[in-house]
């Protein structure tokens, strides 16, 4: 693992968190590697180590760099282009917290205008492609926005949603926008019907984790349709459109989210009710298995990666990066909040990270958010899963407890371990969507 030394003289490994993982972003302002990695780096003299292919080093901190890689990787599904992403990144002033959302929005608007012009001239395919990339760039702007109450948040979210739908319609993609009943409201979803299906067919339900949106999983929907599967992408509470347009925040009891989704697909004549799969990515690697414990109509469940206990991950990283704060949120929450506030005032990254976490979880304070993470613990109940499980994992993923989850499962199970050679080593195989989806769907063809 490659390590670098930051301005504080502390070592961190680039891309350890993975693009849009679901855990403690606040600790990464100090960016310390885990002990094993640090010891290895110390013995090998990190200054002589060569850079890895995924180290862009274009942004001031590794999370923003990973976000850039995430959007570059969406080139695979035609939702971005390499030059467009890099050109946008080159305009970003890393000393200005507002520069990231401003420049990505400018790129999104430019391609939206090009799409409108192409559509007026009757170039519907080009218009669809341009709208699709514009939608992505509108979401990219919100990945690093400092103010959840800013008008841009709703404006960009609405634009991304509208343009994504418009793009797929112009491109003749067999997608149906659906509003799935959920408690006293609905959840936004996209149902992709495979043109290869001649009767009731399997369906793969997919959701993301803490940061990514349903529309970012288009590559999975396309892979499913090519193989005769239907696919339903959705944003749950705390995610994508549901968060920004409906103010729905995360909840730990994810079965209350997935069961209404399964209820919906069960009403469709084109879905085989005995072949329903669920996949959760990033933080979804904890949420989906939690849902599978209680939702018994699933035939298979996929966790990429598997996560057993977010409180362990959060406490561990806090202890590494700021030992004096470890456990303080329990013993003296007021003091913990005060010290976090000082760090937020000093470091823009902390300011963004803390605010973002509290917004998505509806937290009243940093200490309250840490307490909320205590509910995201499935170590003592994961053995109750009945359906067959697939756990996916990469060696450069700090936020994984995949092997522990696999070992704890009592159901039928399989494990896919990616490697540096197949480039699937990052969190959720960012930058390796091709090999990731191929290995995933080969497994699904054998099990779903």
Image (cartoon, rainbow, N blue to C red):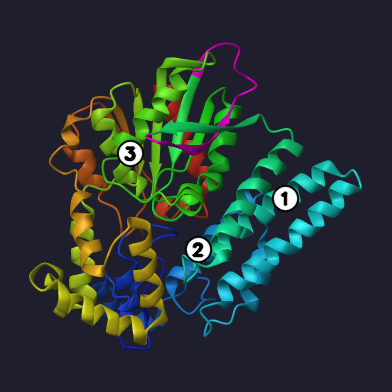
Q: Is residue 194 magenta?
A: yes
Q: Give the SS element for disc 1.
A: helix
Residue for badge 3? 288
Where 162 sits versus 387, above or below?
A: below
**Which of the two discs, 3 and 2, labels the residue nearer the N terminus?**
2
**Which of the two discs, 2 and 1, labels the residue nearer the N terminus?**
1
Q: Quadrant of residue 398?
A: bottom left
Q: Is residue 260 magenta?
A: no
Q: Which residues are magenta?
A: 183-201
The reply to whether residue 52 is in sight is no
Disc number at residue 131?
1
**Which of the two discs, 3 and 1, labels the residue nearer the N terminus?**
1
Instruction: Tell whether 442 sits left or right of 336.
Output: right
Q: Residue at x 55, y 32 (%)?
A: 178
Decide: marks 3, 1 in contact (CB < 8 A)?
no
Q: Give the SS element for disc 2.
A: helix
In the image, farthest residue toward the top: 199
**Badge 2: few (under 14), some or many (20 or more) residues near its Cα, within 10 Å?**
many
Q: CA distance from mark 3 to mark 1?
A: 31 Å
Q: CA distance from mark 2 to mark 1?
A: 19 Å
Q: Residue 12, percent across and down?
A: 33, 75
Residue for badge 2? 143
């Amino acid at each position: 693992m490659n390590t670098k030394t930051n301005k504080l003289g502390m070592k961190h490994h680039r891309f350890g968190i993975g693009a849009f993982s679901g855990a403690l972003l606040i600790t990464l302002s100090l960016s310390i590697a885990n002990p094993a990695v640090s010891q290895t780096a110390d013995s090998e003299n990190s200054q002589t180590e060569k850079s890895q292919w995924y180290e862009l080093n274009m942004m001031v901190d590794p999370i923003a760099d990973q976000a850039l890689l995430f959007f570059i990787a969406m080139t695979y599904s035609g939702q971005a282009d390499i030059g467009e992403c890099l050109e946008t990144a080159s305009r970003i002033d890393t000393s200005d917290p507002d520069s990231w959302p401003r420049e990505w929005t400018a790129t999104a608007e430019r391609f939206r205008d090009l799409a409108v012009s192409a559509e007026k001239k009757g170039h519907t395919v080009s218009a669809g492609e341009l709208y699709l990339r514009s939608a992505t760039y509108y979401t990219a702007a919100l990945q690093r926005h400092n103010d959840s109450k800013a008008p841009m948040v709703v404006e960009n979210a609405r634009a991304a949603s509208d343009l994504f739908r418009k793009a797929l319609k112009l491109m003749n993609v067999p997608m149906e926008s659906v509003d799935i009943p959920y408690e006293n409201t609905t959840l936004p979803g996209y149902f992709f019907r495979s043109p290869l299906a001649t009767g009731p067919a399997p369906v793969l339900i997919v959701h993301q984790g803490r940061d990514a949106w349903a529309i970012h999983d288009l590559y999975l929907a396309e892979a499913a349709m090519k193989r005769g599967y239907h696919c339903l992408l959705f944003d749950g509470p705390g995610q994508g459109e549901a968060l920004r347009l409906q103010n729905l925040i995360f909840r730990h009891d994810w079965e209350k989210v997935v069961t209404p989704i399964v209820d919906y697909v069960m009403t469709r004549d084109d879905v085989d009710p005995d072949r329903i799969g669920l996949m959760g990515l990033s933080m979804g690697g904890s949420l989906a298995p939690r849902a599978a414990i209680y939702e018994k109509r699933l035939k298979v469940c996929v966790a990429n990666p598997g996560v057993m206990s977010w409180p362990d991950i959060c406490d561990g990283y806090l202890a590494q990066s700021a030992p004096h704060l470890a456990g303080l949120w329990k013993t003296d929450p007021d003091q913990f909040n005060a010290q976090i506030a000082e760090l937020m005032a000093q470091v823009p990254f902390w300011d963004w990270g803390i605010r973002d976490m509290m917004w998505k979880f509806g937290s009243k304070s940093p200490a309250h958010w840490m307490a909320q993470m205590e509910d995201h613990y499935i170590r003592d109940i994961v053995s109750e899963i009945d359906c067959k499980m697939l756990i996916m994992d990469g060696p450069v993923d700090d936020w994984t407890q995949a092997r522990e989850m696999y070992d704890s499962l009592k159901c039928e199970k399989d494990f896919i371990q990616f490697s540096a050679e197949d480039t699937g080593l990052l969190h959720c195989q960012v930058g390796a969507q091709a090999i990731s989806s191929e290995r995933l769907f080969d497994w699904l063809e054998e099990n779903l």
